[in-house]
Amino acid sequence: MGFFGRIRESLTKTKQQIVDRFEDIVRLADEPDRRSRPVDVDTIEALEELLISADIGVAATDRIIAAVKKRSDSGEGLRDLVKHELLAIFAAVDTPIIVANAPRVTLIVGVNGTGKTTTVGKLAHALRNEGKQPLICAADTFRAAAVEQLEIWATRAGVDIVRAREGSDPAAVVFDAITSAKAKGRDPVLVDTAGRLHTRVNLMNELEKIKRIAAREVPGAPQEVLLVLDSTVGQNGLAQAREFTNVAGVNGIVLTKLDGTAKGGVAVAIANDLKLPIRYVGVGEGIDDLVQFDAKEYVDGLFEEKW
Amino acid sequence: MFDSLSTRLQDVFKSLRGQGRLTPENIEAALREIRLALLEADVNFKVVKAFIDRVRDQAMEASVLQSLSPSQQIVKIVRDEMLGLFGDTKGGLTESSKRPRVVLLLGLQGAGKTTTAGKLALWLSKQGRHPLLVSTDVKRPAAIAQLNVVAGKAGVQVFDPAGDLDPVSRARGAMAQAATKGFDVVIVDSAGRLHIDDELMTELVAIKGVTDPSDLLYVADAMTGQDAIKSAGEFNSRVGVTGVVLTKMDGDARGGAALSVVSVVGVPIAFVGSGERLEDLEPFHPDRVVSRVLGMGDVLSLIERAEQAITQEDAAKLEQKIRSNEFTLEDFRDQLRTIRKMGPLEQIMGMLPGMGNIKALAENKPDEKQLGRIEAIIGSMTPDERRKQHIINGSRRKRIAKGSGTSVEEVNRLLKQFVQMQKMMKQLGGMAGLGGGGKNARRKAMEMLRNRR
């Protein structure tokens, strides 16, 4: 099964809940005699509820609703209007990552329990399959048994891991990992950091230090900073993205647990408000279940009638 | 907790306060703000709609429109409606006389089940119970190891038969162990699951079958969005849920999910996790949370914190000193330490009525470092100086400043403040019934606070 298939499959649950409702709304609004008229109030409200329920957030929802309200000018179908607007939100943030100096250092950050360690494991595996030689750095020296969990993933993915004892300075582990990667010719370095609430100043400062050390060892590093978001997160995801971007310079989002019922709609809000792209989505518990994000697939997945 | 929601609402109320009389127009404007605040707090769309409709109906009543303090009226309506949403639930565990009684923790991946298991175990042992922990999470790598570590930190026993990787048999084993070794509570940690996983749901039902739990606690991340209802509802219908544990409430999560889960799924919130330390678990009190949301402070929680940090003897001793006017710099330092024991200053300030309103406080966050400096200054004094601060002359001040790494100005400021404080204490000392008085007096005080509403 291809990557797209996996997203589709994982979005099936999402589809059942969102699409059925969307279908109803669209069918009513798109009847031939109503197509060129402004969308009525009930439709607007139903659509608003649908989007808010998908955690898309008030600002992005307002943007989409505004586009829908202008429909009478274009005569476009409601479905296309909504999809176009969503795609426009994602298209505006699709920026490539620049790696001037090797090794590429990827920092994985996020609040507790979103799936950072699992993401590192899956990402290492995916990179191996691409023929790269990644190195895992276990910089979560805080959570009980985090390093053990990551070691299991490293073994599964068949990649090396640089670890330190629980309670030691994470920035020192990052230094060790980069040194080791340079010596052994490993690239990229995937750094698993401890989960931290974005409101904890001390822990956020620790992240800043990790970043500083990485930049000292490799100019321009970390070239990639991925914020791992749980798909079930609500509007707090925005606050997380804002804070982590301020401190750690996040330049991409990983949406995990998309195989649950939640749609990770806050990613739309994040793209709209903070201009951050989604890079990967986690669609299951297996090691292969991390795929590159594709905006069209995602949006189609949300609103397509048939696959 | 709920802080951002509370700031939002307080702004709304402030704008209402400026108006002499309420009009249907400015009520509508306020309702729009409340709606937005609730939606941004992830309260379920339908819940918000129903909530707003009910508040509108009551606010539009003639008696409210004509009352002299319209904004107060609106606050009261919002407060009553919110309390209505939470229902009259009591936090904590349900009553059960079974021995051992079983608490089964369930929830989505990463919600914080394992950490909650440790916190709950510690909470129970503080109540004089003897909990036994068991992990049935054989799926997530190192989950069992994590529980072992957490149990070690909490100082409680954990049942972990090496090599047994069958969740149901692990649960059964823990039950047998508890019966023979005299544990009166068994806390069962389960594997995280996305609720669509039928296999794991079946496993949960099987674990429930062999342990017959008195409490099935659904552990939910306070940052969960609109999905909260669906997952909680699913767990409730497939396995059964008696209460919710809301975790990660120490972040800036607005916890709107809490409102939704309670009002839609109909399951009360039992506990709230409010920090990373194992002590940071509190039984849920809807009235306190609602008061805090509306900026009325949370004096009861503050008193409870204080009770945990201060022993009876200390309080009695202090009272004696204040009465006899013997309050010294040494006592002052002890006081500072006690306050710091109660938790981060910011959290404590948040519990004081009206504090959430003060803009300056939000900008200049109370500085923990400042307390550290004061402690250092007092620490650099000789015992004699601490007892008789009037002997501290210019050269002593210089020495103290040097010793504590501060400046003479700072030492001066501290001494000046201390003298003022002593004066205040003297006046207070004349008043009867300060502090002390034992449990009864405190209970009376709590009662009074409760009835004030």
Image: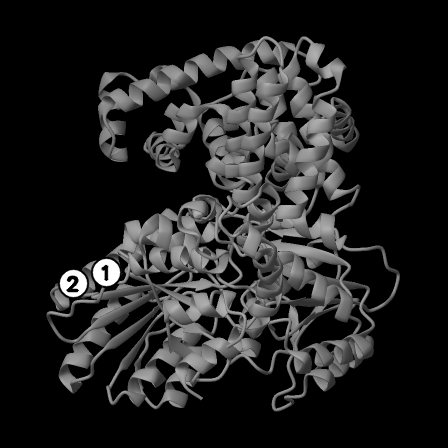
- Kindly identify the amino acid type of the residue bearing the numbered disc 2: Ala
Above or below: residue B357 compared with residue A253: above
Q: Is residue B252 above or below residue A281?
A: above
Q: Nearer the viewer, residue B241 or B48?
A: B48
Letter of the chain that mark 1 sits on in the rendering: A
Above or below for B250 versus A128: above
Q: Residue B231 has which mark?
A: none
**At numbered mark 1, what does the secondary structure look like: helix, strand or loop?**
helix
Which residue is under mark 1?
Answer: A211
Q: Three-letter amino acid code at disc 1?
A: Lys
Mark 2: few/some/many CA within 10 Å (<14, 14-19, 20+): some
* Residue under the image location 71 percent in, 18 percent down: B433
Quadrant of image for the N terminus of chain A = bottom left
Q: Nearer the viewer, residue B70 or B186?
A: B70
Q: Label 2 belongs to which residue?
A: A215
**Horizontal and vertical percent for residue B228?**
62, 57
- In this view, the residue farthest toward the right is B97
Element at label 2: helix
Residue B423's x, y, as percent?
Answer: 49, 10
Q: Do residues under tags 2 and 1 come within 8 Å of each other at their CB atoms?
A: yes
Q: Is residue A55 visible?
A: yes
Colour mapping:
one colour
Task: Pinpoint the chain carrying mark 2.
Answer: A
Determine the image quadrant of residue B413: top left
Q: Residue at the location (67% across, 45% down)?
A: B47
